[in-house]
Image: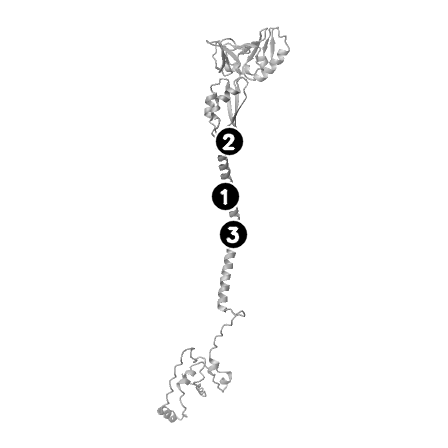
Amino acid sequence: MRRPPGLTPPPAPPPSSPTPEAAPARGKRPKPEPAPAPASDSSTTARQGRGRPATPRPSRAADEHLTEPIVLERSALRGGARTATPAETAPAAPKPDRPEPDGRDPGRSSASQLRQAVRARRRYERREARRFTQWSRRRRISWLVGLGLAVGLVVVALLAAYSPLLSVRTIEVTGTSRLDPATIEAAVSDQMGRPLALVDEGAIREELSQFPLIKSFAVEALPPSGLGIRIVERTPVAQVQSASGWDVVDPAGVVVQSSPQPVPGYPVYDLAGTQLGGAAFAAAGTALASLPPDLLAQVTNATAATPDSITFTFGTAGQRVVWGSAEKSALKTLILQRLIATQDPSRAVEYDVSSPESPVIRGG
């Protein structure tokens, strides 16, 4: 590059005071700079022959300093030139990190602050996650607690049911009037000592089927060690003559009692044209079962050729009752009792209650 006129190269700095850029690194020995080569006479003579004053050629060290940027002030543009020194053009050296007041390294302090910030961010995210999943966690805990309680109750119930502490030690029989409770207890005594949950109802049913008076029964547990048997007895309403004697039957025609002689207190049912357990007999049995015990004891005989032609007689005078069908038997019983109260028991009259809303008394 051609040097502008009027500028002279700056003097080379002494070797003892190198510039900041030329300063060698710590621990390394500086390399010696090569000596500047002397300017040749031919170049000087040529310049003199052109009519220009000969100027000495700067050294190589000076050329190195000239390669640095030169700062020109505004005065140089007006005619005056000023050459920037290497110290002005040298880049500013980085400032060393100042230690913290407590003596800690700034780099290490920044790294620890970063780690603390990361940990704080993670804690915040965990708190937010717990806050947003709080309802689902509570619901899950509620389900688990409820399931645990249910399983615990089932286990406790099973342990208590099959425990020897809840085994049968007493049998209580209720609902009997004609049967002896001790006889029924003896029939089901094989259930003694069994846990209440393992009572065999099939075996009890088989044992109680030997009693004709039992219509139905129910078995119930009486904790901690009781077994209850509630009996529903059959209600005998009439007696029929058989080849062996007399059989007392209930409204369904089931034989409750057998005797070689007529059994007092039950009317004689005439099976002429009907059969035991048929529809006509069932209707007559329902009508007789609706009578109160004191009135039923006065009935001497009953008959029903069809389910709608039930009749029976009662009393010493042979008073006759036309009952009709088995429908509205309770109302018919009430009307019959009121009609009997208005008549003389010694008179042979007929009470027709087949239509209870309009009863009729005939005879007398």
Specify the amino acid type for callout 1. Leu
Quadrant the C terminus occupies: top right
The numbered disc on residue 166 is: 2
Q: Select label 3 or label 2 by which is in front.
A: 2
Q: Residue at x 50, y 57 (%)?
A: 122
Would you call the spot at circle 1 few (<14 residues within 10 Å), some (14-19), or many (20 or more)? few
Would you call the spot at circle 3 few (<14 residues within 10 Å), some (14-19), or many (20 or more)? few
Determine whether 76 is above or below 155 in the image.
below
**At which x and y percent is residue 208?**
48, 21
Pointer 1: what residue?
A: 144
Name the secondary structure under disc 2.
Answer: helix
In the rendered image, the residue lying farthest to the left is 42
Determine whether 74 is above or below 276 in the image.
below
Is tag 3's residue or tag 2's residue first in the polypeptide sequence?
3
Q: Nearer the viewer, residue 274 or 276?
A: 276
**At which x and y percent is residue 3?**
42, 85
> Label 3 vs label 2: CA separation?
49 Å
Q: Nearer the viewer, residue 96 or 332?
A: 96
**At which x and y percent is residue 353?**
58, 13
> Label 3 vs label 1: CA separation?
19 Å
- Are the two marked residues, 3 and 2, in contact with CB atoms closer than 8 angstroms? no
